[in-house]
Amino acid sequence: MRVYGESFIGEKFVSHIWDGGHFAKDALRAKDGRKIEVISRGQWNYDSGADFRNAEIKVGDQVQKGDVEIHVRYSHWRVHHHDVNPRYNSTILHVVMWDDGIKLLTRKQNGELIPTLILCDYLDSSIGKLWKTIEGGEEEPSPCRTKAETMTLQSIGKVLDRAGMDRFARKTKVFGDRLQEIGEDQLLYEGIMEALGYSKNKKPFLELARKVPLENLMGQPPKKIQAILFGVAGLLPSQSYGQVTSDEETEEYVSKIEALWKPSSSQFKSQRMSEEQWEFFRTRPENFPTRRISGISYIISNSKNGNGSESLLSMFLPSFEEGDKVSRSLRKILMPRASGYWTNHYTFGGRDHREKTFLIGHSRAADIVINVILPVVSAYARRLRNEELQQAVTAVYTKHARLQDNKITRYLAGQIFSNREECSSVVNSAMRQQGLIHIYRSFCTAGDCRNCPLTGTNM
């Protein structure tokens, strides 16, 4: 069924309608006829999973808290494979612009059914007017923008500095608590692995790091490390349901890896993961789990301290004695050069691509420095009461250049600043970007504008 206006309507536009509450709130009914009351629409989600998190919806007589997924058409739930993706099991409402006549139930991976709201039946204005309001930028300014307009750019910068330090302190505390349980090397290994998963594969990478402790990998050459990690991850060609493209280079590499995995397969038999846990769909090839695993294999293989014995943390510590070059030195460790099969492949048997120099790129390495290396070393320095190292870590953090923006920093910066020039002049460091993330996660996701350092009365 074709609907007028569908050609220019996208999911982002529908999300803005939902987020702005541009619908008749007192008359809502689900596709199955049940009355719907929107207590809280939730907050934008910029990670994997449903579009809005922490919503509160009353369906019939039952109040539920969870996620809301937005689509243009009713059938897109199935088209986008949410019915087989466990990341959407927290969804409590499916919101779509149009019912395209496909008679399928909105069922989650765990088998539960969720109600669907057809927005076009309840819009508080015509689509044309809503388009002009949303796409033309005529919506009311956000509370962040309203308050920011009364502040100097310097004041906003100070707020972000404090928030950035708060986020760093919290990360240090979390890592410090974990450090007591598992030790610094395993802690650092888990942190790097989780960060390599980016947004879509964080959980499986962390699970893999815990199923294959670092002590099982230290001292091994890269291919052996790759074999064990691929094998436990369930990503080896022999474990795959799909057909791997065969060519001479792939056959030679796979033969070696499978042979290296075989002696370890019985040791990790109870730890094996499944291929379905890993997300390749809509993931940039550079971020494919296969390529990230090859990257960590070289980092672990290179991990030696000054005495030649293996220690992951000790590989990073000398960098803190290099003055202004600390950040560059830390990134270099996290950017192993590609070698062999993975110089021109993203997956087993995948099409050859142009050779890449590094298995982990500059921007990902910088993210890991800020979000993992520095807080872990900070926690380690605190445990040893090493004030000099602690000061060195803080200096690197406060002076680190801004990172590549992500969805959260772009979103919140857009809520605060009226133009790009203002944003660039204020959000000019990684610490201030971290401040944006801290404010978003601590206040925006909870709808707590009153206590937010940017909008509240307690500034």
Image: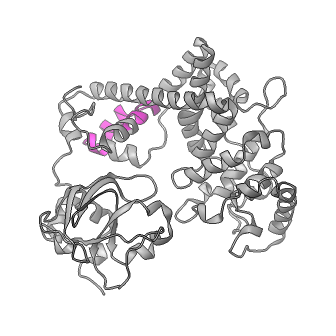
The quadrant the N terminus occupies is bottom left
Where is residue 186 shown, x and y percent of the image?
A: 68, 36
- The answer to whether residue 375 shows anywhere in this view is no
Using the image, determine if residue 351 lies above or below residue 160. below
290 left or right, relative to 439: right
Q: Quadrant of residue 8?
A: bottom left
- Can residue 429 be found in the magenta stretch? yes
Where is residue 332 shown, x and y percent of the image?
A: 67, 36
> Nearest the camera: 250 or 258?
258
What count of labels does the image hold?
Answer: 0
Where is residue 277 shown, x and y percent of the image?
A: 59, 61
21 left or right, relative to 347: left
- Can residue 423 be found in the magenta stretch? yes
Using the image, determine if residue 337 lies above or below residue 269. above
Q: Residue at x 65, y 64 (%)?
A: 275
> Nearest the camera: 113 or 448?
113
> Nearest the camera: 180 or 166?
180
Q: Main secondary structure of the magenta part?
A: helix
Chain part drawn in magenta: 414-436
Q: Residue at x 63, y 41 (%)?
A: 190
The quadrant the C terminus occupies is top left
Where is residue 209 shown, x and y percent of the image?
A: 67, 46
Q: Residue at x 47, y 67 (%)?
A: 110
- The answer to whether residue 418 shows anywhere in this view is yes
327 left or right, relative to 44: right
